[in-house]
Amino acid sequence: MANYIPMFVALLGWVALWGYLYSLDLKVKRIKK
Amino acid sequence: MWWKILILVIIAWVCVGAWIFPPPTPVVSNPEVFRIIYFHFPMAICTVVAFGAGLFYSIRYLSTRDHAYDMRAEISARLGIIFCILAAISGSIFAKHTWGSYWNWDPRETSIFMLLLIYAAYFALRTALADPDQRANLSAVYSIFGFVATIFLIFIMPRIMPGLHPGSPNPTGVSEGSVITFSLKTASVLIPSTLAHVGLFLWIKKLAFKIAEAKKELSNG
């Protein structure tokens, strides 16, 4: 039986990383304008 | 925009799928550790894609002499090193639980170590040259040789030397191919994971280039 704690940690970590990249993307687009 | 959301959804699926499905190879003493393959394999593929992108942009630079391609080649090599380190870390955790030690100097591990040294030298070369044109020219040529070494170290050397990693030949010299059996469930996580990781590399590369370009524009006033 798999331990599901790493799944939630990985999921949260990934969503946080994606959010960071997306906010950076928006910031760069704003600077370019 | 849509492809960034697709990457978010696919890797979220990979995080869930890696744990809800049974481990890919339940025949070893600790099958749970095989779940790491859903991240280890895509990172290794991203390493090759990133160094391949470095080669592509280096050739583009040499044919156009446009420094934007040199910048892209450098960013690709930087990301290649990051993915290579991540593949080595995930691989050594995998090795600890399957081969008994974090580092065994298996041909695959040795080749990854050599690859990291080759690309570390690429950055040493870049920092050693002050003239932008000379730096771009020499590092573009080095990057081409670096990718030839990548092909040899990743696809050839571990397949001709006996070792522990899947794909290594046994002592009689016959390649055993992959010892991991891929079911449909495994493929439904591993293939999207690989594609999404490559997408993530392309996104970060594009973003890093835009940031480097904006910094250059700001410093030029």
Image (spheres, rainbow, N blue to C red):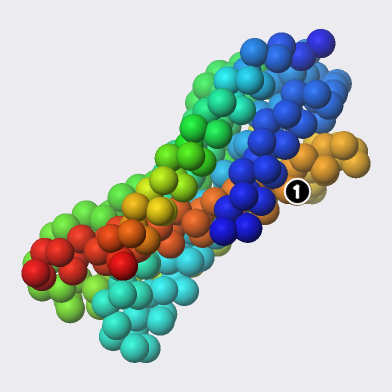
In the image, taking residue B29 as reference, residue B131 lies left or right, namely left
Tally the numbered discs. Answer: 1
Instruction: From this view, report whether residue B99 is shown above or below residue B127.
Output: above
Mark 1 crowdedness (10 Å alpha carbons): few <14, some 14-19, many ≥20: some
In the image, taking residue B148 as reference, residue B216 lies left or right, namely left
Quarter where residue B36 is shown: top right
Residue occupying image coordinates x 50% and y 56%: B203
In the image, taking residue B203 as reference, residue B32 lies left or right, namely right
Q: Is residue A4 visible?
A: yes
Position of residue B208 measured from the top left corner of the image (x, y, whole percent)? 36, 57
Subunit under mark 1:
B
Say which quadrant the C terminus of chain B sits in.
bottom left
Residue located beneath label 1 in the image? B191
Position of residue B69 measured from the top left corner of the image (x, y, whole percent)? 35, 75
Instruction: From this view, report whether residue B194 is shown above or below residue B141.
Output: above
Residue occupying image coordinates x 40% and y 53%: A26
Instruction: From this view, report whether residue B64 is shown above or below residue A19.
Output: below
- In-front residue for pair B93/B104: B93
Quarter where residue B215 is shown: bottom left
Residue occupying image coordinates x 43% and y 40%: A20
Residue farthest bottom in this picture: B63
Residue occupying image coordinates x 49% and y 32%: A16
Instruction: From this view, report whether residue B176 is shown above or below residue B152.
Output: above
- In-front residue for pair B75/B88: B75
- In-front residue for pair B57/B178: B57
